[in-house]
Image (cartoon, coloured by chain):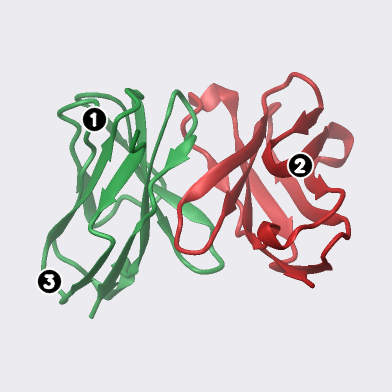
C-alpha cells in the first residue's frame, strides 16, 4: 500500500520554465490537497479537490493550476516558474481533512 | 477566519522530561483542531485531532492534547520525551462550517530532545 506518492522528489527549474508535480493516491479518498511549505511559515493551501472533476483555490493559488480527471491523480502545474515558487510542495489526501501526506517535492527556481 | 499561534519556534527538552508544545487558536465558531508531526525529509503525519467529542484527546506515540475553550488552547503533551520524538510539530485549525477542507496551519515548533 503506497498511500500518497509524489514525483519527482527534487527539481531545479530556470525562471520561466514549466513543470508538473505529480501526486497519486491509492486510498480512494475523495479529498486531495496541494500545500507549499516555506521555513517558519507552516503550510499554505494552494488548491484542493473534493472529487474527480472538482477543484477549487486555496490560500495561495497564483501561478499554479490543477486538474482532477480521476480519483487517484491530482497533478499541480507551474506554467511560468518564478523564484517565489521555490518551496517544498506536499500533496495530501483525506476523507475530509488532510490525513495522509506524501513525502514532498523540493523545487528550486533559479 | 481561523488562525493558530504556536508559542516557541524551538523547544528543547531532556530525554525523559515532559514535552509541552503550545498552541492557541482563534475561531469564531467551535473549531476542529489537529496536531501533526513532520520528521526530516518526510511529509506530515497526523498525531491526533479534536472534533468536539472528549476534550482530552489521545494520539499516537504517547502524545495527548487537551482542548480548553476558556483559554482557546490545544497544547500538546507527552509525559516522557524520547529521542525519536525530535521533529517539527504543527498545530492546525479548521472551522467545521467551512466544509472541513481548509485547514489553517501554525508556523510549527521544532522539538529537540537532548540525551
Q: Quadrant of the N terminus of chain B?
A: top right
Q: CA distance from mark 1 to mark 3?
A: 29 Å
The image shows residue A52, relative to residue B104, as above or below, that is: above
Instruction: Judge left or right: residue A82 versus residue B96.
Output: left
Contact check, label 1 and label 3, Cβ < 8 Å: no
Q: Which mark is residue B39?
A: none
Do discs 1 and 3 share a chain? Answer: yes
Q: CA distance from mark 2 to mark 3?
A: 47 Å
Give the SS element for disc 3. loop
Instruction: Identify the hue of chain B.
Output: red
**Badge 2: residue crowd in 10 Å (few <14, some 14–19, many ≥20):** few
Tell me where residue A76 appears, x and y as whole percent: 22, 48
- Look at mark 2 in the image and give the residue it sits on: B62
Instruction: Identify the hue of chain A.
Output: green
The image shows residue B91, relative to residue B57, as above or below, that is: below
- Look at mark 3 in the image and give the residue it sits on: A16
Chain ID at mark 3: A
Contact check, label 1 and label 2, Cβ < 8 Å: no
**Badge 3: residue crowd in 10 Å (few <14, some 14–19, many ≥20):** few
Chain ID at mark 2: B
Q: Residue at x 72, y 21 (%)?
A: B52
- Look at mark 1 in the image and give the residue it sits on: A72
Do discs 1 and 2 share a chain? Answer: no
Q: Is residue A78 visible?
A: no
Give the SS element for disc 1. loop
The one nearer the camera, A27 or B109, is: A27
Amino acid at each position: 500500500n503506497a498511500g500518497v506518492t509524489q514525483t519527482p522528489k527534487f527539481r531545479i527549474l530556470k525562471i520561466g520554465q514549466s513543470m508538473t508535480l505529480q501526486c497519486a493516491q491509492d486510498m480512494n479518498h475523495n479529498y486531495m490537497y496541494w500545500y507549499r511549505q516555506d521555513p517558519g511559515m507552516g503550510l499554505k493551501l494552494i488548491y484542493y479537490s473534493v472529487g474527480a472533476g472538482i477543484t477549487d483555490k486555496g490560500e495561495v493559488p497564483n501561478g499554479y493550476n490543477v486538474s482532477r480527471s480521476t480519483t487517484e491523480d491530482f497533478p499541480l502545474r507551474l506554467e511560468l516558474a518564478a523564484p517565489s515558487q521555490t518551496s517544498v510542495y506536499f500533496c495530501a489526501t483525506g476523507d475530509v481533512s488532510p490525513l495522509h501526506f506524501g513525502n514532498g517535492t523540493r523545487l528550486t527556481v533559479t | 477566519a481561523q488562525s493558530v499561534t504556536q508559542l516557541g519556534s524551538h523547544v528543547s527538552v531532556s530525554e525523559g522530561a515532559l514535552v509541552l508544545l503550545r498552541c492557541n487558536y482563534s475561531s469564531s465558531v467551535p473549531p476542529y483542531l489537529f496536531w501533526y508531526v513532520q520528521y526530516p525529509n518526510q511529509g506530515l503525519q497526523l498525531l491526533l485531532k479534536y472534533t468536539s467529542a472528549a476534550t482530552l484527546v489521545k494520539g499516537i506515540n504517547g502524545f495527548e492534547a487537551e482542548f480548553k475553550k476558556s483559554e482557546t488552547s490545544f497544547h500538546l503533551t507527552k509525559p516522557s520525551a524520547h529521542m525519536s520524538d525530535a521533529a517539527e510539530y504543527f498545530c492546525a485549525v479548521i472551522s467545521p462550517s467551512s466544509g472541513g477542507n481548509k485547514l489553517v496551519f501554525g508556523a510549527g515548533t521544532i522539538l529537540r530532545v537532548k540525551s
